[in-house]
Image (cartoon, helix red, strand yellow):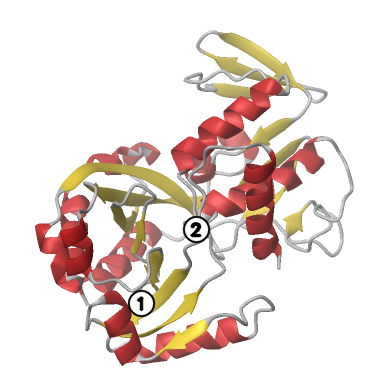
Amino acid sequence: NFAWNGLDYVQDLIKRENMDSDFEMPGVTFTTLRGHEKRLEHFTKYWQDQPRSKDSVYMDRATVSQALNSDAFSGGCRRPHSGQVNPVKHSRELKRIAEQAGAQIFEQTPVLDIEDKETFFILKTPEGEVRAKHIVLGTNGFTHLLPPELGLKRAQLPMFVYQLITEPLTDEDWKALGWKHRGQFYDKTTYCPPTCRTTVDGRLQFNLCDIYVGEGRSMDEAQKVQFYDAAERMYKKVFPAFQKLKIAQRWSGACSIPFDVRSQVGTLHNGRISYAYGYSGAGVMMSQNYGRILADLALQRKTELTEHWFVANGEKGHAKFKRFPLIPGLIAALRTYFEYERVS
């Protein structure tokens, strides 16, 4: 219910604040490729037990083939209760609301170091220093780059998402694509699922994922164009109608994968630092939900949100902070596994 409530919260927030976020509820179709029927069976059984999934539609191979105009899939599950936003527009609107409430926002101001003075922190930036009694860490896929003293170096691994977006589709393009539903689809065949969604201005946005931490913990993987090319080849193979579509733009960004693939939220340094990261690709909605918990933790409010079992605050009955184990070659092994999944 926590995730569903987050979607409700975003929907209510957009309506209440009159946000230009391109919010819509087109639904989502989850699939697996042919030959992976067992994984689809496991996934659909999971959703059958969820309290707000009664309106989900379980689709056999023929139904998915007709709905998505592709014979690449073994079956699927369609969930009408699913929303999406334009994340850039939504972030700008959140900034507008925060500034109207009196917040000061300093963009392009990296924190170079954090010094703990026990009663307060000193945050060092290129333009000066900031003192703070409490720090909120919302660094997600960049969390491993924080100062080692915070103890978050092995908290997560960055997963790069290589995005491509088409030019607006013509009526002829939509007819050739043959999709029965405008919206999103996630293929759950692999650990890092490729996804595709329609946009309100009539485009297709699709991606491919890869996990990486470079030498010196650099983030230069985002510059490697072969993943864009691989994504384009894959979607053209799965959906023949993609052959004629023109790509308007390519870009990439890092999301965050924790050790147990569950979002992490909690406090460190005796409650003086609160953090949230690790949305595993579902951050647009989930980060809004976790943001409410971060606000309560920063203000030291004990609420229904902070009492969720997954909030790691050091108290009995709550989750514990988790780290990736120190295993030599772990990242290389993960990358080999993901490459095997992509080509198998």
- Left or right of 173? Residue 212 is right
Examine the rendered structure and indicate whether residue 270 appears above or below residue 85. above
**Crowd around label 1: few <14 · some 14–19 · many ≥20 (10 Å):** many
| Spot occupied by residue 286 in the image (x, y as percentages of width and height) | 60, 54
Cα distance in 3D space between marks 2 and 1: 16 Å
Instruction: Residue at 39% x, 50% y: name it.
Output: 200
**Crowd around label 2: few <14 · some 14–19 · many ≥20 (10 Å):** many
Residue 320 or residue 107, whichever sits in front = 107
Examine the rendered structure and indicate whether residue 24 appears above or below residue 59. above
Mark number, residue 280: 2
Examine the rendered structure and indicate whether residue 96 appears above or below residue 58. above
Type of the residue with mark 1: Thr
Among the two numbered marks 2 and 1 on one chain, the one whose residue lies closer to the N terminus:
1
Instruction: Residue at 14% x, 70% y: name it.
Output: 240
| Spot occupied by residue 181 in the image (x, y as percentages of width and height) | 37, 70
The answer to whether residue 200 of the structure is visible from this angle is yes
Residue 74 falls in image quadrant: bottom left
Mark number, residue 189: 1
- Pick out the residue farthest to the right: 302
- Left or right of 114? Residue 56 is left
Question: On the rendered image, what quadrant is the N terminus found in?
Answer: bottom right
Residue 46 or residue 276, whichever sits in front = 46
Examine the rendered structure and indicate whether residue 137 appears above or below residue 40. above
Residue 95 falls in image quadrant: top right
Residue 13 or residue 44, whichever sits in front = 13
| Spot occupied by residue 103 in the image (x, y as percentages of width and height) | 69, 21
- Pick out the residue farthest to the top: 127
| Spot occupied by residue 339 in the image (x, y as percentages of width and height) | 25, 66
